[in-house]
Structure formats: structure tokens, C-alpha cells
Image (cartoon, coloured by chain):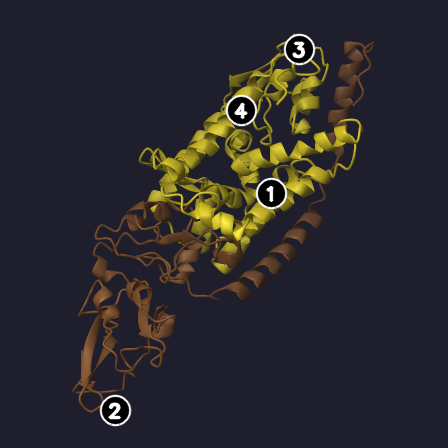
Chain colours: A brown, B yellow
Amino acid sequence: MERPDEDTYERRFERVREHVAAMSRRKFLAIPGILGSVIGGAFAVFEIELLKGKKFHLRPPGALAEEKFLATCLRCGQCAQACPYNSVRLAAAEEGIAIGTPYIEARRIPCYLCEDLPCIKACPSGSLSKEISDRGNVKMGLAVIVDRQACIALQGLRCEVCYRSCPLMGKAIALEFRPHEVTGKHAIFEPVVNFDACVGCGLCEHACVVDIPAIKVLSLADAKGLMGRHCRIGTRIG
Amino acid sequence: MILRNPVSEKFRKWLVIRRAVQISVVALFLLFPLTGLAWIQGNIGAANLFGLSIADPLSILGSVVASKKIYVPALAAAGIVALFYFAVGGRAYCGYVCPAGFFFEISSSVRNLVLKALSRPKRSGWNLDLSPHIKYYTLIGVLAVSAVTGIMTFEIFSPIGLATRVISNDFVAANPNGQNLERFAAAGPSLGLLVLLGIALFEAVFSKQAWCRFVCPLGAFYSLVGRTSLLRVKIDHADCALCLNCQADCPAKYVLDRPLAKEQTYITMGDCTNCGSCIDACPSASLKFALRLPWRK
């Protein structure tokens, strides 16, 4: 807009009013906008559905099921700031739809399962459920011996490291003995995870002494089977 | 930062205040990660301020729409913030608080430096001008996609989220020990930082603050809040000489159209960020902040 100095006030006012009138005559084209957002929205829905549930993230204690978690987590990082062990980190942009959400890399720093659960207390959105007050009720995932050949205890060495690192020693991971069939005089101390007690904190995965852990925390869906309801077992163990 | 207005020769009081607030907000969010002093924890999406839980209202709206559930503490946290911006002007968030807005504002001014280096006039070069209505479609779009997919959609691509996590997660750890600083040095800039720099580069070349002006759904949300806001710029027509210095400095020039044409005494359009550039530019002190009842024009 040009403003020559010799301009009078009246002329300037007239120009301003003409401009306002011209602006109000200008119609915003709603149809391209609607069309654009429908196409963009459909593309976004398609993309998000493709990316959903591609990867298991070990979430902090009390996390809702993954879908509900992604629907409610505000990605504010207060759980990460509350964690005294730096276990909780926020996912980088490379993580796609989970960007900014908290996760735990057990092999790096596991969840030490604080008695007072400060991460749950810090969560403003209820994504880490306040209903969990006892750390025994946490269910982040389940520890599974994923590679029996890599587990040195199963190869006959005396290891017990995962068993002893477990905060619920004897309950979540127990040792079962049986004779070593090759030597005939030694025993194999097999670590066995009790799914009912395991909270999925990852201390075992962190502690496992082999190069790539033989015990890993998996998602509940990946780890857990379901016995058919028609099965009747009179001698059920555990 | 030029402290005096090149046109009206006035000291830019509101620019200085605004920069001080913008820097303080970033500093406040850095305080805990760097020093462990827990005045404010969390980030711009949701935070704990001296024990008071506050949250971005659009973020909470997104989570309600995505999860189809209402979590009362989060709703209260968002309500406090919405009320605050209802009082101080909706898009005051954009002008004073938003770390991404601050970053884009500064990075967009690179444009002026480049033009100066090429000895071209200040407002020349590409200036992509889109409709400010686009952002309302983005707002409806992100909420609709959140509802359909059950995933909080805006959080996936939000440069505000990226910026706030670059502050609290990339450069420093999300905890008092600062461990991520080493990780950052080892891994180089994250994808989030690159996306931010990409937007900044686009804006510097093609269109100043394009994200904030045309696209941002959070801006659209606060624009709606701002329509009835209590604190607004008031124009005194008696002293106004219609020099239009105010409009020249305004980042959203159309908000001044109707007040200047004497159709209104307050800036009522939601896109006004209460940045005070117009007040700083006015040589006759015809503009000032005033309390306005939501229905007054």
C-alpha cells in the first residue's frame, strides 16, 4: 500500500474503506479447502493405519494397552523426567506415529521398578494408569527365553544371573533343576519365567551375560498363548 | 533485534517484552533438564508448573477425540490454560509462548539478511501468500483423523512438539543428568531437528512464518479462543492520522482493516497475537491494550 506524504486524511480514509470493502467482497473458496482436507485426511488415515503396531515398545509401568496409549499420551516427557534411573526416554521422530512417546530400552537401562512408581505419579493424562499402586501389579510385557541355545544356563553352565537380577526373584523367575544328561553327574539350572508374576521390567534382559540377550521382554500379545477353554487339566501346575 | 522502529523512531517496548517472555519460556523448560530445579516439568504440550498440572487444550481435545474417553484431571489442566488465553488473547500463545513460533519468527528474519546481502529491498523476493483459512481445515482435519484412527494425529507431525522435544530431549536429557548431550553429539541432529530446519528454510525462502500464518491447527484453535478474548488492542480514532505504520509492521495485516476503517474500536479478529507491533509502530499513541467485553466491537 503506497502512502505519499502529500496525501490528505480524507483520501487515506477513503482508500482504507475501499480496501475493507474489497476484502469483504473476496470470498474464500471453501470447496478446494474441503477437498484438500478430505484427500489429505484420507491419506493420513491410510498412512497411520499402515504404521500402527509395527514395533513393540516397552512402555513405562502402568501404561495402557498400546492403542489406548497412543490415543492418550501427550508426549510431554514428565514420566521420563521423573525416572531416577534415566530408564525412560522419548521416542525420536524416526519412530513415526510413536514420536515423543516414552519407552524403555531394557538392554540399555531397564526399569528398576521403584516402590513408589514416580513415573505413574507424574503422568498428567492417565496413560500410565494411576490404578496401579503396587509394583507387583505392573504388566509392561513378559520376559521370555527367546534363544535356548544362547542361554548358557541351558547349556549346562551355572549362571542364574537373570534369576538373581529379578526384583521378584523366585516368583517371576524360578530355577528348575534337572540332571545334565551329557555329563551324567552335573545339573542344569533352567530359569523359568512365571507369566502370572513377571512384570516385564527388563532387569533380566539387561543383566543377561551373553552378547545378545537370550531372555527378552516381549509384548503380552507376542509372549502369551491361550489354552483352549475345553482343556480340562486335573494336574495343572502353577 | 532492532530496538527502535525505523519508521516511527519509537522505542519498541512490546517487542522487547515479547522477546523477554519468549526467551524465558524456553529457559524455563530448560531449567529442569539442565539444573534439576523443578519449577516446571514436562513440555509445552503438558507440564507441571509449581505443582499445578497444565496442558495444551488442543492436545487434550485430540486425546479425548482419539480415545473417546474423558480423563478429568487432564481436562482441568487444559481448562486452566484455555481460560488463561481467553483472558490474555488467544493467539498470544503464538506471539509470546510457542517455542516453534519463536524459532520460525527468528529464522524467517534470515530472509531479510539474505535480501540485504543481495542488496535487494526489504519486502522483495518470493512471498507465497495463502489463505489464513487453511489452518481451520488443518484443525478439523487433525481432529477427524484422530477420531478415525484413534491416534493423536497432530502430535505426529507438530513442529511445536518437535521443537519442545528438541529443547528437552535432543540437546539435553529429559532428566537432570544431562546424559543425552553426549548421545546428541554422537548421533548428530535427530530427524525432528532436521524437519524443523526444513520448515525454517522453506519459510526463509518462500514465505515468512508460513506455518504459523496458514497451516498451524493450534494457531487455528487459539484464533477461535481469541475472538472473544478480554485483552485486545484498542484504537483511538481521534488521534489516528491513518499513516498505516501499524499495518506495515503487523504480522497479520488484515486484523487491522476494520478498526482502521472506523468500523470497530477493538481488534477483534482471532489472528491478532497481541504482539504489540502496531502499538510500537504508532507515532501518535492511538493504539493501546485495553480490556474488552467479549461482545464489544
Circle 4 chain: B
User: Front-most of B233 and A175?
Assistant: A175
Circle 2 chain: A
Residue B80: image location, x then y, percent: 39, 34
Disc number placed over residue B18 in the picture, else none: 4
* Cα distance between the residues tagged 2 and 1: 73 Å
Residues tagged 4 and 1 counted as in contact (Cβ below 8 A) = no
Which tag is nearer the camera, tag 2 or tag 1?
Answer: 2
Residue A235: image location, x then y, percent: 16, 87
Circle 1 chain: B
* Cα distance between the residues tagged 2 and 4: 77 Å
Which tag is nearer the camera, tag 2 or tag 4?
Answer: 2
Residue B14: image location, x then y, percent: 56, 19
Disc number placed over residue B283 in the picture, else none: 3
Tag 1 or tag 4, which sits nearer the N-term?
Answer: 4
Please tell me whether residue A148 is drawn above or below residue A219 in the rendered image.
below
- Identify the amino acid type marked 2: Val
